[in-house]
Image (spheres, rainbow, N blue to C red):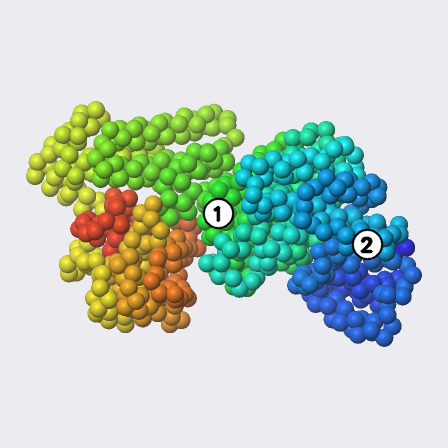
């Protein structure tokens, strides 16, 4: 290997040749061998071996470093066998200069074209550039080291200078946004002035330099910057990303350049991805732009699935011992492996997910946990792209060969892709983002959205009708009813086609089947009843009569009819008096009210929580905290707006939710907790300091009875308590005050049923 530096890549592929035990043995032999004169070769082996072997090699590296201080293994050896790897420093070592890293990356590129010609391309760009970058020092260095063996180093230096000059264009305040974009594209066009491998290598290494600039500006994902500093950290990254976007746009349109240069671009991109699987020095968003520029993905080369998967795993700090595993662990476990997960930079996760969407690592990774991570950070659009990419890979007619030891099973991957889409839409609905859920179910209809299509459309209509009645925009109601009817017709028609021999793998759960039926709780009948009820509550009797006539429904606005309808709802749905004694709770808006009420329930064994909010607002409008026999309705906006209110929240519900001795039950509580944390707080220290006591009743129910896994709280409540919850008030205006009696009953029961269901699931904890 040391006689031919290009063969050093063999060490990077050692994991494909020997098993884990032999890797350790090979590591020891290679480390002490005189055939490897540079300690940098050792770090390459570290990057391509499992975690335990890395620890071993680190120990060996320490001993060799001590030994080399006496024997000078690197400086006097006449054969530069390891010099091409000097840029590969430890993933935790960010002190190596960028040119060293880029130089090392270049050294690992297989089948490089003429470096001198590529260097001339970069020089021509700098010669025509109007830039503040000083060239004198670099030119002097060239004169001092003008030897053939240093061409690659000079090439790396010039790539960084070109990238730096492009970043200066982005940051030039004298240019308008359009002028900046045009100037960047002109600079990219100069790099493509000739359709040659040298030009492709030049533009590829500029992508690499931009990636190094971007990651250096953004810092490591494990930094301690809090969420308030995220916007600041995005600013220095905008230059490299904008430059990379301009180069990608220009290159992708140059069909001849893109086609002839794809082989060289492939080799460079693979070198970058290998490095990204073990180091934080490269920004994955820039690599995604690079791949888009030359339209590179796993369909061109299945090896990209593995390379991208490894880079994504490292970026998310998830290092699987078994590299052949096709699934990731629970998202909470992934996030817990990252230092300061709550403060993790969104740019880092966004970069990993963008790379996944472009490169298609789906033979190696399941999209489901990636979707969960995206949702955790409110990356809904990126999650959509992941769903589309995974579904496209699973339904592609291109045959995917075995990658490593993994056979790409399209049936299994299709199920995973559909499951990811369903999870995305379900979570959007759980977050009360009904318009978003409706849009995603429509856009991703074929990818898994069909199974949630009618329900998402129905709840979006509920939400819209509530708002338009409040604003007296009554004509919109008919359009919403019509949209729900059409969604039912579409799904029924498509299901009939599938029964006739279609390939649809989507499965409707019990709730979806009921919505498509002609039963009382069908989507058609629910939306009509909801519209009439809302009009009646608003005193719009004439509009209600008109709609009833249009939909051929009996509607009599008199006391007897109202009482009969109310009696029917009490019969069908869980009622307040069936669950709790005493009056319906009022909303607690004063600190002293909260303290007194909390003292009455603080000694209970199990507590239930829920939160309500409006889609357009930030944070929670109401927080429900239930004991066994009493429910507190807490006005979060009012209490969190004063120091005394924040203190009361912190010392009562906040302290209990973070207690190691309490059990606080939510039903899929992630969005509730996220909204509570996002609520505006007058104090610097948020009243919700942690959630150690919180458990998920939906997950527990799904583990005990798998058929309940996809059902919402209303249906799980029916299973365990005999009746479903009435969800008619779910889309109410929760930021308005005062809340109606129906709103308060709905909110209180949502939290209380979490306690009741948990007692059924875990009777020993009562």
- Along the line of sight, which residue is nearer the eye, 77 or 539? 77
* Residue name at image x 26 percent, y 45 percent: 732
Q: Is residue 12 positioned above or below 561 on the image?
A: below
On the image, which quarter does residue 422 sit in? top left
Q: Quadrant of the N terminus?
A: bottom right
Considering only order in the chain, which callout, 1 or 2, is on the residue closer to the N terminus? 2
Q: Position of residue 185 (x, y in %)?
A: 64, 36
Q: Position of residue 212 (x, y in %)?
A: 66, 52
Asked if residue 12 can be seen in this view, the reply is no
User: Considering the numbered disc 2 on the image, is that residue within a helix, a strand or a loop?
Assistant: helix
* Residue name at image x 83 percent, y 52 percent: 142
Q: Are marks 2 and 1 in contact (CB under 8 Å)?
A: no
* Residue name at image x 15 percent, y 58 percent: 583
- Along the line of sight, which residue is nearer the eye, 562 or 126? 126
| Residue, disc 1 | 379
Q: Is residue 574 positioned above or below 654 on the image?
A: above
Q: Using the image, tell me which numbered label, if any, was put on residue 576.
A: none
User: Considering the numbered disc 1 on the image, is that residue within a helix, a strand or a loop?
Assistant: loop
- Along the line of sight, which residue is nearer the eye, 647 or 127? 127
- Horizontal side of 248 relative to 148 (left or right) equals left
| Residue, disc 2 | 140
Q: Residues within 10 Å of mark 2 (few under 14, many from 20)?
A: few
Q: Position of residue 19 (x, y in %)?
A: 75, 58
Total numbered badges shown on the rendered structure? 2
């Amino acid at each position: 290997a040391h006689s031919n530096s290009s063969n050093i890549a063999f060490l990077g592929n050692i994991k494909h040749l020997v098993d884990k035990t032999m890797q350790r043995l090979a590591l020891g032999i290679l480390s002490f061998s005189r055939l490897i004169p540079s300690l940098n070769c050792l770090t390459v082996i570290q990057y391509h071996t499992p975690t335990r072997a890395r620890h071993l090699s680190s120990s060996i590296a320490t001993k060799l470093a001590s030994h080399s201080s006496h024997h000078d293994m690197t400086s006097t050896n006449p054969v530069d066998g390891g010099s091409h790897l000097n840029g590969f420093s430890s993933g935790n070592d960010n002190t190596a200069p960028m040119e060293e890293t880029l130089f090392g990356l270049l050294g690992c590129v297989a089948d490089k074209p003429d470096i001198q010609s590529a260097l001339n391309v970069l020089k021509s760009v700098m010669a025509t550039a109007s830039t503040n970058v000083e060239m004198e020092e670099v030119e002097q260095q060239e004169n001092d080291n003008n030897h053939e063996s240093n061409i690659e180093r000079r090439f790396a230096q010039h790539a960084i200078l070109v990238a730096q000059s492009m970043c200066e264009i982005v940051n030039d305040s004298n240019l308008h946004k359009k002028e900046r974009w045009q100037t960047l594209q002109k600079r990219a066009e100069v790099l493509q002035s000739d359709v040659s491998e040298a030009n492709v290598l030049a533009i590829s290494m500029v992508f690499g330099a931009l990636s190094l600039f971007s990651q250096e500006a953004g810092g490591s994902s494990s930094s301690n910057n809090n969420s308030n500093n995220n916007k600041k950290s995005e600013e220095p990254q905008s230059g490299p990303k904008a430059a990379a976007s301009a180069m990608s746009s220009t290159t992708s349109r140059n069909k001849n350049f893109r086609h002839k240069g794809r082989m060289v671009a492939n080799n460079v991109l693979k070198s970058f991805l290998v490095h990204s699987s073990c180091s934080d020095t490269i920004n994955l968003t820039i690599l995604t732009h690079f791949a888009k520029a030359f339209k590179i993905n796993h369909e061109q080369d299945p090896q990209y699935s593995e390379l991208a998967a490894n880079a994504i795993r490292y970026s998310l700090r998830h290092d699987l011992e078994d590299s052949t595993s096709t699934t990731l662990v629970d998202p909470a476990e992934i996030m817990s492996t990252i230092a300061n997960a709550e403060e993790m930079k969104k740019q880092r996760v966004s970069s990993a997910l963008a790379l996944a969407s472009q490169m298609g690592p789906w033979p190696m990774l399941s999209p489901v946990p990636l979707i969960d991570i995206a949702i955790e950070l409110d990356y809904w659009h990126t999650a959509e792209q992941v769903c589309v990419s995974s579904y496209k890979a699973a339904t592609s007619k291109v045959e995917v060969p075995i990658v490593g030891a993994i056979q790409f099973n399209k049936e299994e991957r299709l199920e995973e892709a559909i499951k990811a889409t369903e999870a995305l839409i379900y979570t959007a609905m759980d977050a009360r983002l009904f318009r978003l859920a409706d849009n995603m179910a429509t856009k991703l209809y074929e990818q898994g959205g069909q199974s949630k299509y009618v329900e998402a459309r129905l709840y979006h209509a509920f939400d819209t009708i509530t708002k338009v009645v409040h604003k007296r925009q009554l004509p919109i109601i008919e359009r919403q009813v019509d949209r729900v009817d059409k969604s039912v017709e579409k799904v029924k028609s498509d299901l009939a086609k599938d029964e006739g021999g279609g390939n649809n793998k989507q499965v409707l759960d019990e709730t979806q089947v009921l919505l498509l039926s002609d039963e009382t709780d069908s989507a058609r009948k629910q939306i009509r009843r909801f519209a009439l009820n809302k009009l009646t509550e608003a005193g719009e009797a004439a509009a209600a009569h008109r709609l009833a006539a249009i939909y051929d429904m009996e509607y009599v606005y008199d006391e007897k009819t109202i009482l009969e309808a109310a009696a029917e709802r009490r019969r069908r749905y869980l009622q307040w008096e069936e669950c709790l004694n005493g009056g319906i709770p009022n909303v607690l808006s004063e600190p002293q009210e909260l303290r007194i009420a909390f003292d009455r329930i603080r000694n209970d064994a199990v507590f239930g929580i829920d939160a309500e909010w409006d889609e357009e607002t930030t944070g929670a409008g109401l927080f429900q905290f239930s004991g066994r026999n009493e429910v507190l309705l807490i006005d979060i906006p009012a209490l969190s707006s004063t120091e005394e209110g924040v203190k009361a929240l912190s010392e009562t519900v906040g302290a209990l939710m973070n207690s190691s001795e309490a059990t606080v039950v939510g039903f899929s509580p992630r969005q509730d907790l996220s909204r509570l944390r996002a609520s505006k707080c007058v104090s610097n220290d948020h009243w919700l300091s942690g959630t150690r006591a919180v458990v998920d009743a939906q997950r527990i129910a799904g583990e005990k009875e798998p058929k309940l896994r996809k059902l919402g709280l209303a249906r799980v409540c029916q299973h365990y308590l005999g009746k479903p919850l009435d969800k008619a008030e779910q889309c109410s205006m929760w930021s308005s005050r005062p809340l109606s009696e129906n709103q308060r009953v709905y909110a209180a029961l949502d939290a209380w049923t979490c306690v009741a269901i948990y007692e059924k699931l875990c009777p020993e904890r009562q």
